[in-house]
Image: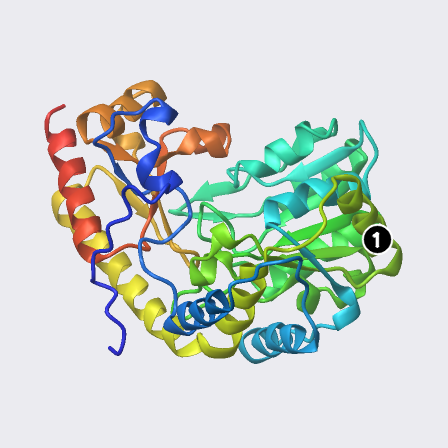
Amino acid sequence: MKYDFDKITDRRDTDSIKWDFAVEFGLPADVLPLWVADMDIPTAPAVTAALIERCRHGIFGYSDSKGEYFEAVRSWFSSRHGLELKSDWLVKTSSVVFALYNAVRAATEKGDAVLIQPPVYYPFYKAVEENGRRLVSNELIFEDGQYRIDFDDFENKIVSENVKLFILCSPHNPTGRVWTREELKRLGDICAAHSVTVVSDEIHCDFTLEGYTHVSFLNACPDMAEHTILCTAPSKTFNVAGLQCSNIFIPGDELRESFKREVSLTGFSGINALGLVACRAAYEGGAGWLDELLIYLEDNLGFLRSYLASELPEIKLVEPQGTYFAWLDCRALGLSDKELNDLIVNKAKLWLDAGNIFGKSGEGFQRVVLACPRKTLAEALDRLKRAVRSL
């Protein structure tokens, strides 16, 4: 490989939320973190080079982007995902989570019902409830080691609860499902039939495993374009979340103007100057780096799979199809959620994402980030094995 993903980069004392704030989160200082969705792998050299060049200029005033920025984004999604985007659809925001909050306000009124599919990324819950909307859950069905959508419940909930907005996670976090074109179209047809707006969070779209292909909701359901908010960002793909730059695409004029009004009401006035630089550089020059990273992440998954089978058969891997997460089924350990979290944090000295934060159906599971050097993953698994053997 051209790029060395095995290299350990010490992130301590860099104000990293992941590495420097365990005590502030109420955890022991010596936990090994594999929780929040950022990578312990430096970004693509093309991004670093562009940031260094921009920093040499020395002035970081109010900034925006011109045509070259959109062309970089457009070309990336066209070449890698077959998605054709238009410049007038684009609204740049600081993050996808920020966009979710504004999308909820733009597409619904207080008291309206918003549907999500647990176990799912926990800010979805907050974006609904903290905006005074009513949360409706269409629980994913877990059977034969994999998750699937309960379409009958999906439509029944939309009708009975008078759902106005559906927040889709695609690929799905934390389960790792990559929804098929057929599944997405069926969701879109139901939403179209009942006048439901869709927010499609596709931030993990660049992470699919061999044999699986991400299909954008806009491609699967073109008839829903006027009623869709598509959320994208380079932050997960290129490990630049701290640079605060996301690209939100809203084809419908009325929905886009409503979204922009909500963004304006927050006082948001512009994107981080370095975020704009990083995004353009990533999409223009980071493809080769990402291609190699995907191979490395798949190898990490293989290492995890083999380790669990031979050393920790009590813990089952829910086979992911995308994202850089592993969703671990720990229910065979026979522990309550409190006991499981105690095992992970205080005995294994690990900081993972407890499954219950993704919803009640996540109880008994743990989410692990695989985007780290192999040595880090191996140390985490050894810690986990020692803890489990102590039971």
Residue at image point 59% right, 55% down: 272
- Residue 64 at x, y percent in the picture: 68, 63
Residue under the point 58% across and 64% down:
276
Instruction: Pick whichever, 188 or 296, lies toward us.
Output: 296
Q: Is residue 145 above or below residue 162?
A: below
Applied colour scheme: rainbow
Q: Please provide percent x and percent y for residue 312.
A: 17, 41
Is 310 positioned to the left or the right of 80 in the image?
left
Measuring from the top left, give residue 354's x and y in whole percent: 38, 32
User: Which residue corresponds to mark 1?
Assistant: 255
Q: Is residue 236 left or right of residue 292?
A: right
- In the picture as drawn, the residue positioned furthest to the right comes out as 254
Q: Nearer the viewer, residue 228 or 19?
A: 19
Displayed quadrant of residue 157: top right
Q: Can the viewer see residue 293?
A: yes
Q: Position of residue 232 (x, y in %)?
A: 60, 59
Judge by depth and name the residue closer to the eye, 382 or 68: 68
Is residue 214 visible to us here? no
Q: Which quadrant holds the C terminus? A: top left
Residue at x 40% of width, y 42% of height: 36
Q: Is residue 264 above or below residue 352?
A: below
How many numbered marks appear? 1
